[in-house]
Amino acid sequence: MSYLTHIQRGVDQIEEHLDDELSLAEVASHAGISQWHFQRIFRALTGETLKTYIRSRRMARALDRLLSTDLRILDIAVAARFESQEAFSRAFKKAFSMTPTQYRQLGRENLFPRKVQFDRQYLEHINQNISQDPQMTKRPRMRLVGMKTRFYGVDSEKNNIASKIPPLWAEFTPRVLEIPHLVAGTGYGVIRTTSSDSDLLEYVAAVEVTDVGEAPPGMVALELEAETYAVFDHRGDPDQLDLTVNYIYSTWLTQSGKWHTQGADLEIYGPDYLQGSTESKMQYAIPIGDAVPEFARI
């Protein structure tokens, strides 16, 4: 069973339960993927967050009911999971510049067509700034020391990367030389999930060490098990790293026949990394395997 099949199972679950309470964790569980990985792949494929998609599908069903049924607007609002008719009407008017009553009176099904648009920036990026065929690298167990935080990624409506990750690096970088047994030259951003039913992530700004002793105050020590990584080059502005990650999850991973092991993703900052420069080069790596993991067998 492929990643795309798992995503489709989640989408089918959404469609079957649009009128019900539906948590993101339930959707991911039905799909057989951890919540973060489902949201990460879903956003990479569709360009929108899972919560936004569910909300838009409920609104689309409400539009259909306004035109094709005699249901009261209150009943349509409740079915769309709004707390009141007033809340539904406010959201409707904000989205469509008219009230539900006005829309029903117009009776025009194609009043709000969606035009498919190509993201030119993304297309240019994947053609010029990404190694589309990754290097497969077997990394031995890694010992790291760094500073950590928790955050919500771009696949979540709670996205707070800007307020979490740059300040962490700004605090950590001046203190790197405090770390004993330092392996100089490369920094790592370690991204991993906090649980299978949450999109809350842990990020560690870290460097490798030859021996994990007592970490300096405010820092943590961690070990990553030996893994095979698919390593992608990211060239150009580091702020566009998300475009590379989108390509990895939406295009390469879903077509590769490989499976994410659920281990930590790595941002790799080597000597060619230049903060804020279009001449910068860094790498993004995901842990992969050939064997179908347990979560994909359900």
Image (cartoon, grey):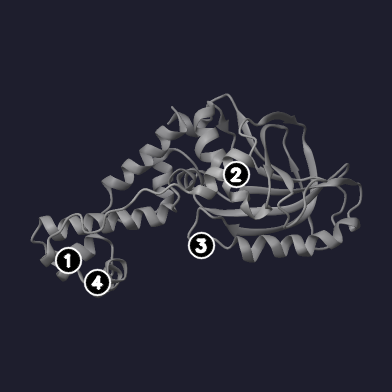
Instruction: For label 3, count other residues whose C-alpha is less than 10 Å away and answer few (under 14), some (14-19) or many (20+).
Output: few
Locate residue 111, reporting x and y percent: 21, 59
Q: CA distance from mark 3 to mark 2?
A: 21 Å
- Check the image and report above or below for 272 versus 231: below
Res 89 label: 4
Amino acid carrying label 3: it is: Lys
Question: Looking at the picture, how far across and down is residue 66, in whole percent?
Answer: 15, 61
Dot 1: element:
helix
95, above or below 116, in the image? below
**Residue found at x 72% / y 29%:** 137
Q: Quadrant of residue 45?
A: top left
What numbered label is drawn on residue 103?
1
Q: Position of residue 285 (x, y in %)?
A: 67, 39
Q: Residues within 10 Å of mark 2 (few under 14, many from 20)?
A: many
Badge 4 marks a residue whose secondary structure is helix
- In the rendered image, the residue lying farthest to the left is 70
Task: Judge left or right: residue 298 versus residue 128.
Answer: left
Tell me which residue sits at (58%, 24%) in the image.
Answer: 290
Say which mark, if any, is on residue 289. Answer: none
User: What residue would you read off at disc 2?
Assistant: 244
Q: Earlier in the sequence, mark 3 or mark 2?
A: 3
Picture disc at residue 158: 3
Mark earlier in primary sequence (4, 1): 4
Amino acid type shown at disc 1: Tyr
- The crowd level at tag 4 (other Cα within 10 Å; few <14, some 14-19, many 20+) is some
